[in-house]
Each structure stands twice: as C-alpha cells, then as structure tokens.
Amino acid sequence: MPLDQSFEGREYPPTPPYEVGREKIREFADAIGDDNPVHRDQAAAKALGYSDVIAPPTFPIVLSMRAAAQVVRDPEFGLDYSKVVHGEQEFRYTRPVQAGDVLQVSVRVESVRVAAGNDLITTRGDITTLDGELVVTAYSTLVARGTAETRSPEETGPTEATGPTEATAS
C-alpha cells in the first residue's frame, strides 16, 4: 500500500523527558567500541570544558528512534514496517549531549517521496532540553521497499524516474 504523501510536514508531540545518565553513556560507548575517556571519566570531560561526561556522537539515536516510532506506528500513514530498511542517518549538533541532560524529541515528517519503486520517508527530530535549548537535530531516512510499485505515473509525480530517456537509452 503506498504511503500517504500528505503526511509531509506533519508534526508529532514531544516524547516524554529522557534523563541522560553516565551509565547509559558508558554502556552505549562500550556497545559501539568507543574507548574515549570523555564518555566514562568526569575528570577527562571536565579537562575539555564539559560539566560531565559527554555521549558519543551517535548516542542521540536512542532518543530519535523512540520519537520516529510515532511516525512508523501511525496507522493512518500506512507504513508496512516489515518492508523497511534504514537508509540514512545524520546528526547536526549545537553542543554535545552530556550526562544530566533531560531531553525530549519533537519529530516531523520532512519528506515522503518515491524512488525506484520504493517509498522514502525522511524525518527530522529536534532534540531539546526541557527549557527548549536545541542540542541536536537528527535526520533519518527510511526506505519502504517495493511499496510504491503499484502507483500510477499520475500518483508518483515528477520525483520518480519512469525509465531511460532517449539520451541515456542504449
């Protein structure tokens, strides 16, 4: 079933607050094999000017995946999660995530487009403190494999290639 492209621009409520703990940071660093002492040793982090240990750069996936679940599980959207693969992930920081931060995520559907018979969904998750300070923005692209194949050219619009052009045909 094709995805509802009218979801582009839809925003979801913020997630419940998540308190970032030193142990969670250490466990995440261990899981990804990051031995940097700033993820474990408060003195090492303070020596670099931080108030506490800082999280590895990909740690916000813990929060952003929970927020994106609102989109994935929205029955009106029509996403068949059994056909989904993770296409791309990007984090844009204003500062590192630190132990003691209390964060929430507001997620928005940035785009719903079609490419090669697949639906591509890009979400944006603004990860903020409870006071509204933006810490990091997470962009994620999911690929729903083969879900767009049943669409007619009128439904797909100009974003899906319809085949080779005369200039590229062999």
Image (tube, rainbow, N blue to C red):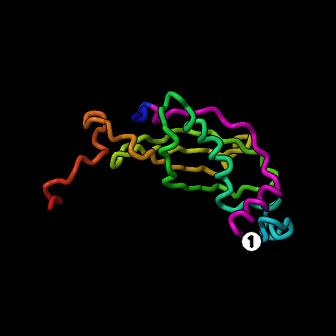
Mark 1, other Cα within 10 Å: few <14 / some 14–19 / many ≥20: some
Residue lying at 59% horizontally and 41% vertically, measured from the top left: 68
**Depicted 39 relative to depicted 92: above or below:** below
Q: Of 65 and 99, which appears nearest the observer?
A: 65
Whether residue 71 sits left or right of residue 60 in the image: it is left
Q: Which residues are magenta?
A: 7-34
Q: How many marks?
A: 1
Q: Amino acid at mark 1?
A: Asn
Give me the residue at 82% from left, 51% from top: 100
As drawn, is 36 to the left or to the right of 58? right
Q: Is residue 79 magenta?
A: no
Q: Which residue is mark 1?
A: 36
Question: Percent position (x, y) of residue 45?
Answer: 80, 66
> What secondary structure is marked by label 1?
loop
Quick one: which residue is furthest to the top in this view? 76
Determine which quarter of the picture holds residue 149.
top left
Q: To which quarter of the image does residue 49 belong?
A: bottom right
Query: Which residue is depicted at the point 20% across and 54% down?
Result: 164
Q: Nearer the viewer, residue 107 or 128?
A: 107
Based on the picture, tell me whether residue 11 belongs to the magenta stretch.
Answer: yes
Q: Residue furthest right?
A: 43
Residue at the (64%, 55%) spot, across then down: 94
Picture quarter with the N terminus: top left
In the depicted structure, whether residue 34 falls above or below residue 141: below
Q: Position of residue 14 (x, y in %)?
A: 66, 35
Residue sticking out furthest to the front: 82
Q: Position of residue 93 (x, y in %)?
A: 62, 56
Q: Position of residue 137 (x, y in %)?
A: 60, 49
Where does the C terminus fall, quadrant-wise? bottom left
Q: Answer with left or right where residue 86 lies relative to residue 60.
A: left
